[in-house]
Amino acid sequence: MNDAPPLIRLSGVTKSYGRGHAEFQALKGIDLTIGSGDFVAVMGPSGSGKSTTMNILGCLDTPTSGSYQFQGVHVERLERNQRALLRRHYLGFVFQGFNLLARTTALENVELPLIYRGEPAAVRREAARAALEQVGLKGWESHTPAELSGGQQQRVAIARAIVTRPEVLLADEPTGNLDTRTSHEIMELITSLNERLGITVLMVTHEPDVASYARRVVHFVDGLVESDRRHGEES
Amino acid sequence: MLWNTLLLSLRAIRRNLMRSFLTVLGIVIGVAAVVIMVTLGNGATKSVSDQISSMGSNLLMVMPGQRFGPGSDAAPSFKSADIEAIRSQISSAEWVAPVAGKSVTTVYQSRNWPTVVSGTSNDYFHAGNWELAAGRMFGEGEERGGKAVCVIGETVRKKLFGGQNPVGCEIRVKDFSCEVVGVLKSKGQSGMGSDQDDSIIMPLKTVQRRLTGNQDVSRFTVSVRKGASIDAATRQLTLLLRERRKIGDNEEDDFRVMDTRQIAQTLTSTTKILTMLLSAVAAVSLLVGGIGIMNIMLVSVTERTREIGIRLAIGALEREVLLQFLIEAVVLAGMGGLAGIALATGASMALARAMNIPYLFDLKINLLSFLFSTAIGVIFGFFPARRAAGLNPIDALRHE
């Protein structure tokens, strides 16, 4: 067990934007290890580097230096297309702004990742229906985002993220655009996905309420990890 | 992968019906405008050159004065004697057809019709490639004696007689009645747009005696024998006329000799210039269509960039995204191009019929405008997408 590489290991990851005098270091050397099946909340004030870290973990962005290993594979050495395939097969995303395709039905939105995977139409449709049912949207398959509430849109986004049975679900402020009640519904859904399907969840949030659903909370300040504690531990 | 990408492209088209429709519309208008203009221009040119070749390629037209057209400067008319001199002295002249014209109103029973009477000889029919639809030409005695007989054009027949057979009937021309002995076959519009069938032909003497009251011949046509040199005939004719009209060595001609080649050249070059002008206007509309497409594509670039970000985030490869957008652009532009050609074909057929010119399918211009507009559609649909697909997914997602 101990020989197997951890699911995710960041070591000495930095990220800078701009050049010369305008250079801004968003991450100043992050070390972070996340095991399979964990539920991690990343917290911190604006500009602390939590979203940047999330984007690097999700292969949406690349680190300036340092290494990022995913199941022992050095992601920073992968090229663009390989990173896309990693996203396709192992990662699922949920964003603050939902990022659903406009004027496209819930079913087609959820089907989308499966199309890129090359699944046949029948399998695709079945899996998309099942995923929508799983997030509690049975009967809403043919609605477009404009016809759904914010909470429902986020559920569609979650269905889209889990329809491929990803290893990791990355959620960047998933409740940021939602009211308190809906936020809790969404968090309960995410928690149940973590518990029932064993999907590792990484979530950025600045709401302590929301973070309390996680088993582990990592605090970022000023581009560095300030604290990293498990639920129930004292700081 | 291709099949799936095609599916994605078609979904994207369906999802953005308005944008797709406007893109297609821009191309349709551009293609149709160019194709219609060029097709009609070609038809008009063809119709003009057909008219000219129906006149015969070996004609010399001679008229007093130096200017082309009616109302010439005050040069004296030709006389009947000039015609006789040409007939006897210029060996390469096959037919010499004098014309003494007069505008008159013709009456048959209760109908009347204003037209032009041309006094001429049977040579007129030969030189002008006129054929008879009914009846006969003039008899020798009728020509020599200036009898009141006439051959009428198709328009005159229609206006005066309707469905009735006019041969043998008497029509009133000014103050005398005149027997219709023949009807000309229709020739339609001339290259300059006048109705060639709207005329009445009478023997020269008849017109001179009863209508104009003098021996003048306002113009005449000489057809040059096959094989004889048109230039040589023109020179001989000019010399003879200068001598007969007593023009001094240092003086300019006070008449003009034109051959049909010159007229053909003038007319076809005019229609060609017009075609070019129309094509330029059409090219502008193609350009405007292209700018419309560009606009639509650029306006939607934010939405498309985010869409590309979403696709990349959920695991699409850059080349899959690009292929999708390429297919989308090609499908839309191709549909627009085909619809434009279909519209243009229908419209040019209808317009050609209405304008009484032949419809000529021009493969080159169809292909050219199709390719051009498709290229615009593809370039403006595809290149913004290419830029977006090259971004980091997170930058594409955050595009504003």
Image: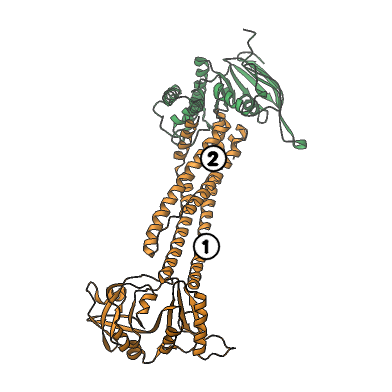
Tag 2 or tag 1, which sits nearer the N-term? 1
Tag 2 residue: B303
On-image quarter of the C terminus of chain A: top right
Residue in view at x 34 percent, y 76 percent: B198
Toward the top, the furthest residue is A1
Specify the quadrant that holds the N terminus of chain A. Answer: top right
Amino acid at dot 2: Glu
User: Which is closer to the viewer, label 1 or label 2?
Assistant: 1
Q: Which residue is mark 1?
A: B276
Q: CA distance from mark 1 to mark 2?
A: 41 Å
Q: Closer to the camera, B299 or A48?
A: B299
Q: Position of residue A140 (x, y in %)?
A: 41, 29
Q: Position of residue B344 (x, y in %)?
A: 43, 54
SS type, badge 1: helix
Q: Which mark is residue B2?
A: none
Res. B21 visible in picture: no
Q: Mark 1 belongs to which amino acid?
A: Met
Question: Mark 2: which secondary structure?
Answer: helix
Look at the picture and state if A45 lies above or below B269.
above
- From the top left corner, tell me how far across and down residue A102 is, in percent: 48, 37
Q: Chain of mark 1?
A: B
Q: Residues within 10 Å of mark 1 (few under 14, many from 20)?
A: some
Chain letter, colour orange in render: B
Above or below residue B364? Residue A12 is above
Name the one closer to the observer, B89 or B2: B89
Comparing B292 with A138, the one in front is: B292
The answer to whether B242 is drawn above or below residue B38 in the figure is below
| Count of residue discs | 2
Q: Is residue B368 visible?
A: yes
For this view, does A155 lie left or right of residue B250? left
| Shade representing chain A | green
**Residue A70 or A230: which is nearer the viewer?**
A70
